[in-house]
Amino acid sequence: MQLHADIETRVAAIQGQYTDWPCRLGCDGCCKNLAAIPELSAPEWGLLREGLAALPADELNDLAGQLDALAQNPATPIQCPLLDRSNGACRVYAHRPLACRSYGFYLERGVGLYCKAIETRVDCGDFSEVIWGNQEALDRRSREWGVRHTLTEWFNAWLAAGFLGIPPDSSPMT
Ligand code: SF4
Ligand code: SF4
């Protein structure tokens, strides 16, 4: 997806300038403190589903259980069910949604909403020369992807359709 490629370009530029940038596979502070169940557009779900389809059946069953528990009790902060709690790594890192790719690198103009790990570095002046990505522009572009549904809704529709029975470019939502 072009938008993901553009994000990767921005991320690579920032990480190239700051080789100790904290965002990486295994840094899970944001994944453990979600304000809501993740929401995805159809293109994001299509990509994520490729990652899910590669997971072992026991992990998918575990995920189904976690999403069910979340639906019963969506108390915040939410720990993302796609997080591998044993090592703090995202189980679908290469296929993760846009918000996960951009969170540590994009800001709304004039509004610094950082995770704690980044806020600490900003406060001590480490990142004063960073050219952050433009969150407003990202939001504008991603709206072109259409309606968003929660991970739970996408996953349950996929489950109901028999997992791998859906072509990657079709929507399980009716
Ligand atoms: S946004 Fe913060 S918690 Fe999330 S990966 Fe980046 S540094 Fe880690
Ligand atoms: S999808 Fe992956 S990167 Fe995104 S919040 Fe969940 S565990 Fe973290």
Image: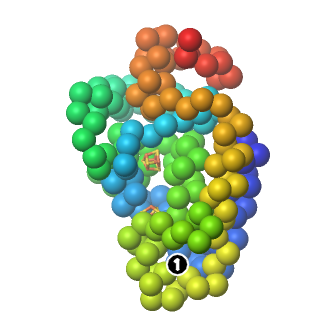
Q: Give residue 71's quadrant in the image.
A: top left
**Residue at the spot 37% in from the left edge and 49% down from the top edge:** 35
Residue at position x 44%, y 44% in the image:
91
Question: Residue drawn at (66%, 65%), measured in percent from left and top?
Answer: 133
Asked whether residue 65 is in view, the answer is no
Q: Looking at the image, in which quadrant does ligand 1 appear? A: bottom left
Picture quadrant of residue 115: bottom left
Tell me if residue 8 comes above or below residue 52 in the rendering. Answer: below
Q: How many marks?
A: 1
Between residue 70 and residue 26, name the one nearer to us.
Answer: 70
Q: In the orientation shown, which residue stands out farthest toward the bottom? A: 125
Task: Tell me the quarter of the image containing the C terminus.
Answer: top right
Q: Is mark 1 within 8 Å of ligand 1?
A: no
Q: Which residue is label 1 attached to?
A: 20
Q: Which quadrant of the rendered structure holds the N terminus?
A: top right
Horizontal and vertical percent position of residue 97? 55, 43
Would you say residue 7 is visible in this rendering?
yes
Dot 1 lies on which element? loop
Rendering coords of residue 22 (x, y %)? 48, 71
131 left or right, relative to 77: right
The colouring scheme, among rainbow, by chain, secondary structure or one colour, is rainbow
x%, y% of residue 92?
49, 42
In front of the other: 3 or 63? 3
Q: Amino acid at mark 1?
A: Asp
Q: Is 44 positioned to the left or the right of 112 in the image?
A: right
Task: Determine whether, in the image, residue 33 is placed left or right of residue 12.
Answer: left
